[in-house]
Image (tube, rainbow, N blue to C red):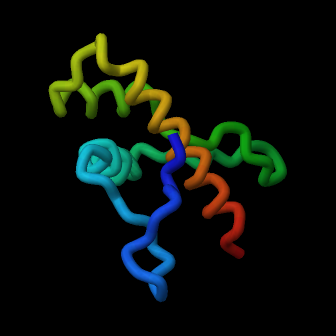
């Protein structure tokens, strides 16, 4: 899944166009951000950074996402999570 897409709203706008079918996944990602963990280990090295998977499962249960549909959802969330890591790493 390419979350950035190839289309934008207008020639002067750099924001990606969000397709209607992607809104539930993007909303799930935004609602899951409080479950993001940036654990610090010894001497400031990051040992674990990313979503708490148990919290994501609970959020999927609350949203009514059936276990059969979760494989595609996990894949899309991993893509969004990877992009979020890139954004976080670029911040000073």
Q: Is residue 78 left or right of residue 35?
A: right
Q: Total label count?
A: 0
Q: Name the side, left or right, on which 89 lies relative to 58.
A: right
* Residue 90 in the image: above or below residue 23: below
Please provide percent x and percent y for residue 22. Answer: 31, 46
Above or below residue 15? Residue 67 is above
Please, which residue is most extreme toward the right here? 43
- Write the residue at 50% across / 46% down: 80
Q: Residue at x 47, y 88 (%)?
A: 12
Left of 21 or right of it: where is 41?
Answer: right
Q: Residue at x 49, y 51 (%)?
A: 3
Of the pair 27 and 39, the residue shown nearer to us: 27
Rendered location of residue 56, percent (x, y): 37, 32
Q: Residue shown at 47%/83% (left/top)?
A: 11
Say which quadrant the C terminus sits in: bottom right
Residue 87: percent from the left, percent from the top?
A: 62, 63
Query: Is the residue 72 above or below the residue 44 in the image?
Result: above
Q: Nearer the viewer, residue 42 or 32?
A: 32
In this view, the residue farthest toward the top is 68
- On the image, the x and y values in percent for residue 84 come to 56, 54
Q: Where is residue 54, by image quadrant?
A: top left
């Amino acid at each position: 899944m390419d979350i950035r897409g190839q289309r934008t709203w207008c020639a002067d706008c750099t924001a990606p166009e969000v397709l209607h079918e992607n809104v539930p996944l993007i909303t799930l990602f935004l609602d899951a951000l409080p479950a993001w963990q940036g654990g610090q280990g010894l001497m400031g090295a990051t040992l674990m950074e990313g979503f708490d998977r148990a919290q994501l499962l609970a959020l999927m249960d609350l949203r009514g996402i059936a276990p059969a549909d979760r494989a595609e959802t996990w894949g899309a969330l991993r893509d969004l999570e990877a992009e979020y890591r890139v954004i976080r790493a670029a911040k000073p």
